Amino acid sequence: MNSRARTNLSLVLILAFLLTVTAGCSNPISKFTKQYKCQMAGKPEPRTAYEYVERGMEHANANEYDCALGACSEAISLDSHLSTGYACRGGVLGSRGDYLKAIKDFDQALNLQPDNGDFYYSRAQVNERLGNTDEALDDLADAIELIKSELGRSLAFALRARIFQKQGKLDDAINDYTQAIQLAPDFAYHHGNRGEIYFEKQQYEKAIADYSDAIRLDEKNPYFHGDRAKA
């Protein structure tokens, strides 16, 4: 899979816990708080810390990171003990490339809620981008143990598989992608990414089978078609 496809998938993974929206961010207006100076069409001004977290997630999913950062920061200002406020801001900072600041926010989120597997997963993503491989693997071990949703756990296995692949531990990577597929069999990228490792191991029939499954699940994705043709 080429770098563009990996970048798109990384953006999906790093905001996997956020809500999906399509509304846009308008110009700042004076009636909003100092840190949050945006609005979303058809939606009232947030009032509580939790509502600001939700608004921050909505802006982040629309790639409106300045607005998202303001909303998440406002949530923290209203309730400094709200773990999701720090996780919200950490996710936004990570998507902007402010990795060290993102780590600090995820550290604080985990101090407040140490049994939240999603926070470990999100911090692992940032650690992986920073090249902190050992820290990322430690976080993923906790994420796999603590995340309750099958899709969430599958994403943790997939990220660990990617790290193993970079380390040349191809069999370990295949095992983790297999776990991910068992948990989320309809997630096309798990199949495509395992196919890439089979291709690297020159096990072309298995690679083609995985790429074919990925195409069946996401037939309009040009990268899967290209990868299968290459195999």
Image: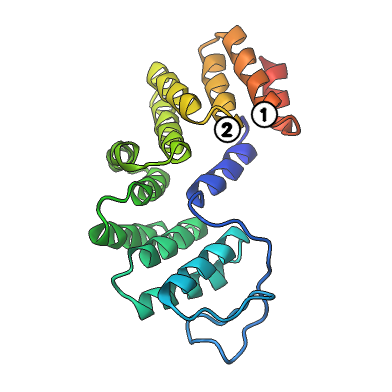
CA neighbours of label 2 inside 10 A, class few (<14), some (14 to 19), many (20+): some
Q: Say whether disc 2 or disc 1 marks the residue closer to the N-terminus.
A: 2
Reply above or below: 145 against 127.
Answer: above
For the image shown, how many numbered marks are present on the structure? 2
CA neighbours of label 1 inside 10 A, class few (<14), some (14 to 19), many (20+): some
In which quarter of the view is residue 8 placed?
A: top right
Reply above or below: 224 against 58.
Answer: above
From the viewer's perspective, tell me whether residue 217 is left or right of residue 90: right
What amino acid type is highlighted by mark number 2?
Phe
Q: Residue at x 68, y 77 (%)?
A: 26
Reply above or below: 79 against 56.
Answer: below
Spatial CA span between label 2 and label 1: 7 Å
From the viewer's perspective, tell me whether residue 80 is left or right of residue 210: left
From the viewer's perspective, tell me whether residue 70 is left or right of residue 126: right
- The residue under label 1 is 217
The one of 160 and 55 positioned closer to us in this rendering:
55
The label shown at residue 42 is none
Q: Residue at x 56, y 22 (%)?
A: 196
- The residue under label 2 is 187
Residues at badges 2 and 1 in contact (C-beta under 8 Å)? Answer: yes
Q: Position of residue 57 (x, y in %)?
A: 52, 63
In which quarter of the view is residue 230 placed?
A: top right
In which quarter of the view is residue 158 placed?
A: top left
Q: Position of residue 223 (x, y in %)?
A: 69, 30
What amino acid type is highlighted by mark number 1?
Leu
Q: Residue at x 40, y 16 (%)?
A: 171
Reply above or below: 77 against 94.
Answer: below
Q: Residue at x 28, y 62 (%)?
A: 108
